[in-house]
Amino acid sequence: MNGSTQILQLPRILFICIFFISGCTGLSHRISEESKEFHSSSEAKEIISILVSQNHTLKTIKGVGKITFLEKEITTRIAWVASTPDKIRITLSSVSGHPMISAATDGQWFYLFSHATGDFYKKRPTNFNMKRFFSISIKSEDIVNILLGRIPVVEYDSVGLMEDRSIKGLSAINSKSVEVSSLNKDIKGNKNSSVLLLKNKWGNVREKIYLNDRHDAHNIEMFDSTGALVYRLELIRMQEIKSYRVPYRLKVSNDDGAGFQLDLDRYWVDAAVSPSVFTLAPPK
């Protein structure tokens, strides 16, 4: 197969891989109680209140960058538009700038379209409607919050704040990622300080939020009702755009090795966005 043929087939390969790869399983890891101290729930709730209020005035964003799909080790250009609470449009482009794949959700429908092959997909969104694009179970609302520099927070019935000063407390996060993150003092501070544990009414952990010594969140883990890991978010590096702290590099993954790393090269806040941009039409 010559080089030109490979280039022509890349959009189709990307579309097939992203459309059908899935994986959201994985066992949650219990954190040892040794050398850890629980804080009051009121302190934990105060920290959550601060986290959910981050960038609360930011409603719309645009950006461009590159995305690497971890399982297939495919890297391509990406552009996106997002609006709270759950509207987003994403386009993957070739090196030359030609669009290859677009995905969008307007809160009512999820759309997926291959510009190269003409394949079109439209369906009512589910709780994990972005799985068909990112190969990992994640809500569009979570993606929007992450891009806006906010921490996704699940509904919970109880919350605890637990000391975690050891790198070993970061379940399933490899040491290399921790070292890279620790170079950015805006995220990690000087040490890992504590973990927020958000639980449902049966006492099952639904989310872990890892904090530095200044209570800035740098990693989160989301779990389903059975305790299986849904996805892990690593905020590797942040940037400041106007008065907002937003991601510069992040990684979302699961225990099966699926997921993506996103590098955000350019970022526009408070962008003017038409609602029509979050819908896609079938090819004529």
Image (tube, rainbow, N blue to C red):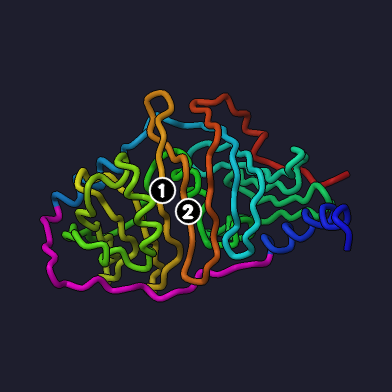
Q: Is residue 95 magenta?
A: no
| Residue 3 placement: quadrant | bottom right
174 with respect to 94 (left or right) = left
Q: Which residue is mark 1?
A: 236
The residue at 25%/47% (across/down) is 48
Secondary structure, mark 2, is strand
Q: Callout 2: 10 Å neighbours few (<14), some, many (20+)?
A: many
The residue to which callout 2 is attached is 251
In terms of secondary structure, where does tag 1 sit? strand
Residue 191 falls left or right of residue 240: left
Q: Is residue 22 above or below residue 66?
A: below
Q: Quadrant of the C terminus?
A: top right
**What amino acid does circle 2 point to?**
Lys
Q: Are marks 1 and 2 in contact (CB under 8 Å)?
A: yes
Q: Nearer the viewer, residue 243 or 109?
A: 243
Residue 7: x %, y % from top left:
82, 53
Image quadrant in which the N terminus is located:
bottom right
Disc 1 residue type? Ile
Count of numbered circles in the view: 2
